[in-house]
Amino acid sequence: MSDYNKKQHASSVILIWDSEGALPIGDWTSLLWRSYDSGGRGDVFSIPRLIEDNASHLRARYLAWIYELGETMVRGKRLIEHLELRSGFSYWWMTLFAEKCNYSKSKQIDDVIRLMAFEKWATSRSISHVVLVSANQPLSECVRLWCEKLGIVFEWQRKEKERGRLSWLIRVYQAAPHTFQALVWLIRYVVNRYPLRGVGLKEWQQSDGRVTFFSYLFNLVPDAAKQGNYESRYWGHLPDALKCELSKTNYLHLYVKDALLPTSKHAAAIIRNFNNNGQGMQNHVTLDSFLSFLIVFRTLCDWCRVFWMGIVLKHQIGFNLNPALNLRPLFEDDWRQSLFGTVAMSNLLYFNLFQSALKSLPQQQCGVYLQENQGWEFGLIQAWRAAGHGRLIGTPHSTVRFWDLRYFFDPRSYYSSGSFNLPHPNQVACNGPAMYDAYKHGGYPVCDLVEVEALRYLHLAGFTKHARSVNALAQLPVKGAMRVLVLGDYLHSNTKLQMNLLEQSVSFLPSNTVFIVKPHPACPILSADYPVIKMSVTMEPISKLLGECDVAYSSAVTSAAVDAYCAGVPLVSVLDPNTLNLSPLRGCSGALFASTSDELVTALKSSVLLSRSQSDRQEFFTLDTKLPLWLKLLSNQAD
């Protein structure tokens, strides 16, 4: 074969490498599905890098597709209308499609974005043959359908999928129909949460407070909680500031199991303590306090209704991004979970619990909730307004990342004049310029945005960096150890990736390097699981730990990375090739990323020599410990 013909052949055969191990060399053009490192070869392309090069276009295109999916006409009605759950409210907004949680619940969205990048790349090429090396069956089906539509030969070289060690009971449960899983989930939920039934109900119903906060019974300050005092890292010292202003407040908590509150009995006890110590200034209740047979019955009725709609609509909805790209294989499970499974059951239960809670609450002038745009939040918004309460404020409690799709909608969603529109709060309280700009550039109505202090980051206002133990890398072995603060993640998979990468790198770092590990409260890190790393595990406040380290090392997603960045502490973050770049520091100057052990070693060593200003905190957050903006916002609502 002549050199020219070889070149033509190579350009027409595409190898999509979605696998571990070394990329095979051959007479083809290679596409790395989950890697940034193309090795400098001209015949190897990185899909993650193509995504970053076209990030704004791809995100907007995906959001537009979700919007148009909801607007799909079926038998003369939009899909949103078919899913009417209450008058003027569509269940569509509680589905996984509208939630768009590519962070944890719908990870296949990342593959959709990759497919979009691949298709864009492929339009300028003549392709005759596609070979996919992958363990991902839904992905292979999507690529097969695309090739079939365009007359391209398709070959799937199937890899074995890694399977975790699960008990036989869990394996049986996961193999069962989604309807069975949903019913089992409901029974277990009611049994486990029954001790919370009625706890705090009297105080809630008789409250004369006019401002209500909605958040998780999680991330509490342990020492305060043990004394029966409510201190939440979500709200900082805002509750105490309101108490000083003699403003009575109500708190509705969603219980989340953790080390401090391992059972609902512990949660019930702490709610009682909060109410006893609150002395009428603070009234606390959990969502599960409103559990009853009637609530369960209403939930089952709603579930049966949604189940039937799912059956009727399933084969009448097209999941085509365009005529050639059919995404149904990737979204099949999301449809079943959203209409038949545990996602449907849990969202409908929360919705009915919110309806009961807000109907029994005296008239409120203002409500504030942690905004992550999860399905239950839209149920809260509907229930709040149906009960006739006043203004509702959503506040993202940490950072808004570019690729965290939960926070973004197609702009048409905000300005639609039709029925069953996107439920959204009256205002979004942004904790600083970075969040304000993220919402603004995402198309959110600017008139509904208001800037407030960053409650979770107020410790940065008075942060002072302690003197480092070393001034240069060359002095490390002589004058002291490099102190590395490891910041864990909420998800076990992210934390495992982070720690495994560190474990591979330890032998190439100075032998006296000190590793201080701070896990996320919901994801413990045990020294025994990583014996190669000589580390100490602590739950000390991050503000204290940052002042005593030389460099921080974070997972790919955690917002704790921003703490280090804004404190002027050199930071290295994992760049996870298995996901989109969900780092809150994406695009920030001076942010260091590592996706391999070599990159991590180089980044950690070089970061010690860096000296950065703490002025970056102003790029992200509004910091004033007196909270004038929050107090003004809430007092305005009370007027």
Image (cartoon, rainbow, N blue to C red):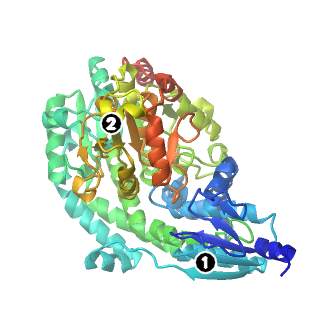
Instruction: Compare marks 1 and 2 and give the one earlier in the sequence.
Output: 1
What's the residue at 44%, 37% (across, down)? 571
Q: Quadrant of residue 319?
A: bottom right
Residue 313's disc number = none
Cα–Cα gap, marks 1 and 2? 54 Å
Q: Is 607 positioned to the left or the right of 590 in the image?
A: left
Dot 2 crowding, Cα within 10 Å, few <14, some 14–19, many 20+: some
Question: Label 1 amino acid?
Answer: Glu
Q: In which quarter of the image is the C terminus?
A: top left
Q: In which quarter of the image is residue 537?
A: top left
What's the residue at 86%, 78% (across, down)? 2
Instruction: Label 2, secondary structure: give it.
Output: helix
Residue 31, can we see it?
yes
Q: Is residue 558 above or below residue 170?
A: above
Question: Label 2 amino acid?
Answer: Pro
Dot 1 crowding, Cα within 10 Å, few <14, some 14–19, many 20+: some
Instruction: Label 1, secondary structure: give it.
Output: helix
**Mark in the foreground, 1 or 2:** 2
Residue 375: image x %, image y %?
45, 54
Residue 78: image x %, image y %?
64, 62
Q: Quadrant of the N terminus?
A: bottom right
For the image, the number of numbered tags is 2
Q: Is residue 154 above or below residue 564?
A: below
Q: 152 or 365: which is nearer to us?
A: 152
Q: Do the residues labelled 1 and 2 touch (CB within 8 Å)?
A: no
Q: Name the residue under label 2.
A: 477
Q: Is 450 positioned to the left or the right of 150 in the image?
A: left
Q: 248 or 387: which is nearer to us?
A: 248
Q: Name the residue under label 1.
A: 141
Residue 418, can we see it?
no
Residue 340: image x %, image y %?
44, 71
Q: 96 or 175: which is nearer to us?
A: 175
